[in-house]
Image: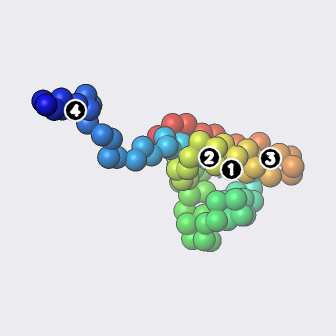
Amino acid sequence: MSKILVRPRTKARTKTKRPPLYKVILLNDDFTPREFVVVVLKAVFRMGAERAYHVMMTAHRKGACVIAVYTRDVAETKAKEATELGRSKGYPLFFTTEPE
Ligand code: TYC
């Protein structure tokens, strides 16, 4: 009896697909106090004091600074939370997200 060999038409996928990542970006404004921006960065993005200060000053000088990358859900939640903290104090502090 002759055997029929059936081969898969495509190669089995060996790689695990990673979810697309999103950047959280801090935007500068003229009103939010520097110290408050640092407080928010420490609280929402778990930054140490030095890194938070450096990120704040980069946004202050250049207009914007990439803070971190997360999955879309986490990036959007953190950006919203941080923006809301500023808003609750009447500041126009703004965090946005974009695909990496
Ligand atoms: N530019 C603000 C000030 O001079 C401080 C500030 C820094 C605000 C970074 C927002 O993303 C920001 N008080």
Which residue is painted at 86% across and 51% down in the image? 89
Q: CA distance from mark 3 to mark 1?
A: 10 Å
Q: CA distance from mark 4 to mark 2?
A: 43 Å
Q: Around disc 3, counting alpha carbons within 10 Å, would you say few (fewer than 14), some (14 to 19), or many (20 or more)?
A: some
- The outermost residue toward the bottom is 49
Q: CA distance from mark 1 to mark 4?
A: 48 Å
- Please state the horizontal and vertical placement of residue 66, each as a whole percent of the image: 53, 48
- Please state the horizontal and vertical placement of residue 4, each as a whole percent of the image: 18, 29
Q: Amino acid at mark 2?
A: Ala
| Label pair 2/1, CB-CB below 8 angstroms | yes
Relative to 31, residue 41 above or below: below
Q: Amino acid at mark 4?
A: Arg
Considering only order in the chain, which callout, 4 or 1, is on the residue closer to the N terminus? 4
Which mark is in front, 1 or 4? 4
- Please state the horizontal and vertical placement of residue 63, each as a whole percent of the image: 57, 43
- The residue lying toward the viewer, choosing from 17 and 39, is 17
* Residue on which the image places disc 2: 75
Q: Quadrant of residue 35?
A: bottom right
**Of the numbered discs in the image, which one, if any, rests on residue 84?**
3
Confirm whether residue 83 shows in the render: yes
Q: Is residue 27 left or right of residue 69?
A: right
* Residue on which the image places disc 4: 7
**Of the numbered discs in the image, which one, if any, rests on residue 78?**
1
Ligand 1 within 8 angstroms of badge 1 C-beta: no
- Please state the horizontal and vertical placement of residue 78, each as a whole percent of the image: 68, 50
Q: CA distance from mark 2 to mark 1?
A: 5 Å
Considering only order in the chain, which callout, 3 or 2, is on the residue closer to the N terminus? 2
- The residue lying toward the viewer, choosing from 62 and 3, is 3
- What kind of element bears circle 1? helix
Q: Quadrant of residue 2?
A: top left
Q: CA distance from mark 2 to mark 3?
A: 14 Å
Which mark is in front, 4 or 2? 4
